[in-house]
Amino acid sequence: MGKTIGSVILGYLVMVVVVFGTFSIAFLVLGTGGSFQEASYDISNLWIVVSIVLGFIAAVVGGSVCLAVAREVRAAHILALVVIVLGIVFALPQLTGGIEDPGPRAEDVTTFEAMQSAQQPTWLALLNPVIGAAGILTAIRLKKKTA
C-alpha cells in the first residue's frame, strides 16, 4: 500500500516538474507575443495547442514513472483519478468567477509573471484533467505493449 501511495505521489510530482520545465521552455521559445493574445493575458491559440501537447507528454512521463515504481497498473489508475480530481479542484476558481482579471499586459513579461497572470479559457481548464488522465492511460497501454 505504501509503495502504491508513494508511486502515485512521485508520478504526480514528476508531472508537475515536467509541466513546469517544458512550459517554461515553451514560453522562452514562443515569447510573450506567441504565448498571449495582443495586449492581454489571454493565452494564444498557439499556446493552447502547445499546452495540450506538453500536458499530455507530462502525463505519459508521470504515469510511466508511477508504473515503474509501483509495478502495478492499479497505481496508475489511482494517479489518473487524482489528476482528474485535482484538475477539477484547480479549475473551480475559474468556474466560479474567482479569478481576478490582471488587466492589460505589458509588452514583455517574465516567465513568473506569465504563469501568475495567464488567462486560459474555461473549456481548457476543464479539458486539462482529461488530457492528464488520457496521458496516464496511454502510459499504461505502452507498458502493456512492452511487457
Image (cartoon, rainbow, N blue to C red):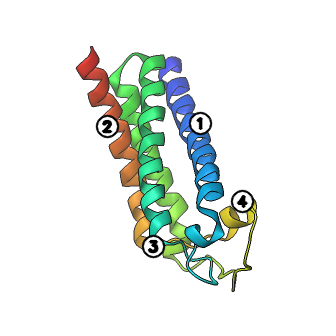
Identify the mark at residue 111; answer none if there is no mark. Answer: 4
**What residue is shown with label 2?**
137
Residue 27 vertical position relative to residue 61 in the rendered view, above or below = below
In this view, the residue in front, 99 or 135, is 135
Give the mark, 1 or 2, whose residue is nearer the N terminus: 1
Residue 49 at x, y percent in the picture = 42, 61
Look at the image and tell me whether residue 125 can be seen: no
Q: Disc 4, disc 3: CB below 8 Å?
A: no
Alpha carbon separation for disc pair 3 and 1: 24 Å
In this view, the residue in front, 93 or 23, is 23
For the point 57% across and 34% down, the residue is: 14
Q: Give the side of residue 80 with respect to residue 87, left or right.
A: left
SS at badge 2:
helix
Alpha carbon separation for disc pair 1 and 2: 17 Å
For the point 48% across and 34% down, the residue is: 62
Identify the mark at residue 13; answer none if there is no mark. Answer: 1
- How many badges with numbers are in the image? 4
Alpha carbon separation for disc pair 2 and 4: 31 Å
Residue 51 at x, y percent in the picture = 48, 56
Amino acid carrying label 1: it is Leu
SS at badge 4:
helix
Q: Give the side of residue 114 with respect to residue 75, left or right.
A: right
Q: Disc 3, disc 1: CB below 8 Å?
A: no
Give the mark, 3 or 2, whose residue is nearer the N terminus: 3
Q: In front of the other: label 4 or label 3?
A: 4
Quadrant in the picture for the C terminus: top left
Identify the mark at residue 126; answer none if there is no mark. Answer: none
Look at the image and tell me whether residue 73 can be seen: yes
Amino acid carrying label 3: it is Thr
For the point 51% across and 59% down, the residue is: 89
**What residue is shown with label 3?**
122
Amino acid carrying label 4: it is Thr
